[in-house]
Amino acid sequence: MPEFTGYRRDDGRIGVRNRVAVLPTSVTASPIAEAIAAEADASVRATPHQMGTSQPERAREQTERTLAGTGRNPNVGAALVVELGTETIDADDVADRIARSGKPVETLSIRAAGGTRAAVDRGAEVAGDLVDEVEAARRETADASELVFAVECGGSDATSGIAANPAVGEACDRLVEDGGTACFSETPEFIGAEHILAERCADDEVRERLLERVDAREDMAALMGVDMRGAQPSPGNQEGGLTTIEEKSLGAISKGGTTPVRGIVDYADDLPVGGGLVLMDTPGYDVESVTGKVAGGAQVVAFTTGRGSTTGNPIAPVIKVTGNPATWDEMASNMDVNAGTVIEGDSLSTVGDRIYDTLLSVADGKRTAAERRRLEEFAINEIQPNELAELRGEAA
């Protein structure tokens, strides 16, 4: 069984990084969280986001779930939740949900601290104390079955579906064979290939839930005046050589490999350890989708791109894979795996082995290109007003 070393947490899960997370409850607290992280130790990471101080109930619940899940991610050893003090999201509630995983959690109110400067000073002090606590953790050996591996694609082109995505899928198959969890998402990108995914579901319940989610995402897009089947592939995808939504979707789902779909979870819901191939219902926006899977517990992410991407994540290392030889040449400093060798004659199996080896080495501590350059994006999926109206049964 392949092994790696990580940080064992009180809830039994194992992290591949030992972060202190600074989690703002709103957009107003986000700059303060960033300032705290900048003044604290290098292991401290902020998760600034765009969500407001007051949100409709369903949107607020999703934001809370995302923040709490991010704090519970096993890559986080301790957390500081920062609020302005006027939000509908209560920092203590988020902290309590994180603390149930057994890790140290503190809260900070910007108003109570005395404003921006005082809050940054106090926050950096608290973060420093949390760093002292997490630094006591030591890496221990774990086997691959404890890994939750999230896969994502963005900036796709004609090489994505024939090289990078199926090669990542080969790595997913190997992880599932070794007892781990692989997760892919972006429900709108199932459209046109949903019948193929449905045939792979482990049971009727998962199958029905999958098809319901695809229909719901398409209906929500229609409420906002978007014809998903007509709007895809995007103009950028078309410039990259993709011609139909079916072509794009077939390529997108190939990054999940070939094993049965064992389950489907909501955005930012917990992903199972040792769960096989599991889907998460997310939007197609790359950063929001990655954030949801990291909030679900993914320790490592693979991001495939044909046209190029620089994205990373503050909590989970992101392995960048391209199947486009030109992109590999032009953006080599942002890439980790060259899957373009498939086009030059390598088998998908050979490149899949290379990606799986990269996954294990990154889990073992090797930094990705995005980590070396501190490229870290975090955005929470916002439930749109028309979606909320539909969820409440108010849509015309």
Image: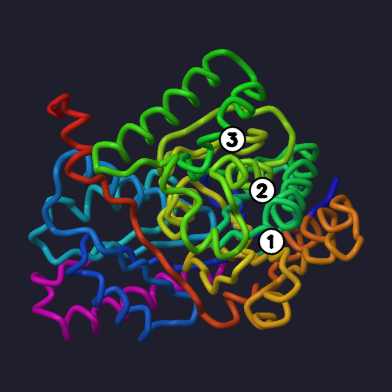
State which tag comes first along the sequence, 3 or 1.
3
Which label lies toward us, 3 or 1? 3
User: Are the residues tagged 2 and 1 within 8 Å (C-beta)?
Assistant: yes
Q: Main secondary structure of the magenta part?
A: helix
Q: Which residue is mark 1?
A: 363
Name the mark on residue 147: 2
Secondary structure of the residue carrying tag 3 is: strand
70 or 393, which is in the foreground?
Answer: 393
Q: In 3D space, how far apart are the residues under numbered discs 2 and 1 (Cα atoms)?
A: 8 Å
How many numbered marks are there? 3
Q: Residue at x 17, y 52 (%)?
A: 90
Q: Residue at x 59, y 23 (%)?
A: 198
Q: Amino acid at mark 3?
A: Val
Image quadrant in which you'd find residue 163: bottom right
Q: Which residue is mark 3?
A: 278
Color style of the picture: rainbow
Secondary structure of the residue carrying tag 2 is: loop
